[in-house]
């Protein structure tokens, strides 16, 4: 479902929502996203690394694979 921004429909463009934390430096935004992914994994409690990556891909589709792997590695290091 497209984001209904103030100029939606003009010139065939569909505006996208702003970043979750505008104004944060890239490193802080990445750290915040990593923390959010780890909280998501703690809440969903995947049984395997494969399941963790699948859940992260569904919940954070625009996040690079390397970041999803980093989040999954941090959780599973202590569970297995």
Image (spheres, rainbow, N blue to C red):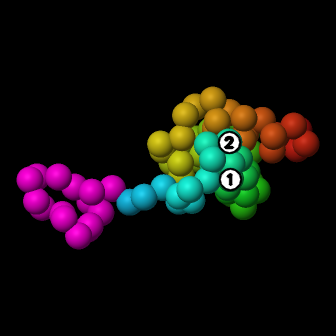
Compared across the picture, whether 16 is left or right of 73 comes to left
Q: CA distance from mark 2 to mark 1?
A: 9 Å
Q: Is residue 8 above or below residue 26?
A: below
Residue 54 in view: yes
Q: Give the percent coordinates (x, y) of residue 40.
A: 67, 56
Q: Residue at x 88, y 44 (%)?
A: 79
On the image, numbered disc 2 is attached to which residue? 27
Examine the image and state in which quarter residue 48 appears. top right
Q: Position of residue 49 (x, y in %)?
A: 71, 36
Q: Residue furthest top?
A: 66
Q: Secondary structure at mark 1?
A: helix
| Residue 46 appears in view | no
Determine if the magenta segment contains residue 11: yes
Range covered by the magenta-colored residues = 1-16
Image position, residue 58 (x, y; %): 51, 48
> In screen coordinates, is 77 left or right of 39?
right
Give the structural element (helix, strand or loop) at label 2.
helix
Q: Are marks 2 and 1 in contact (CB under 8 Å)?
A: no
Q: Is residue 26 left or right of residue 22?
A: right
Relative to 5, residue 76 above or below:
above
Q: Main secondary structure of the magenta part?
A: loop
Q: Nearer the viewer, residue 3 or 45?
A: 3
Q: Is residue 49 magenta?
A: no
Q: Name the image quarter holding the N terminus.
A: bottom left
Left or right placement of residue 30 versus residue 7 in this view = right
Q: Quadrant of the C terminus?
A: top right
Residue visible at 18% across and 63% down in the picture:
8
Determine which of the numbered discs, if any, sits on residue 32 in the image.
1
Which of 65 and 10 lies nearest the eye of the viewer? 10
Q: Which residue is at a point 17% across and 52% down the rendered structure image?
A: 13
């Amino acid at each position: 479902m497209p984001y209904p921004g103030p100029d939606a429909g003009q010139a065939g463009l569909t505006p996208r929502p702003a970043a979750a934390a505008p104004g944060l430096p890239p490193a802080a935004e990445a750290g915040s996203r990593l923390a959010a992914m780890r909280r998501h994994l703690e809440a969903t409690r995947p049984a395997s690394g494969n399941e963790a990556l699948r859940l992260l891909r569904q919940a954070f589709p625009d996040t690079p694979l390397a970041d999803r792997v980093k989040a999954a590695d941090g959780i599973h290091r202590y569970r297995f």
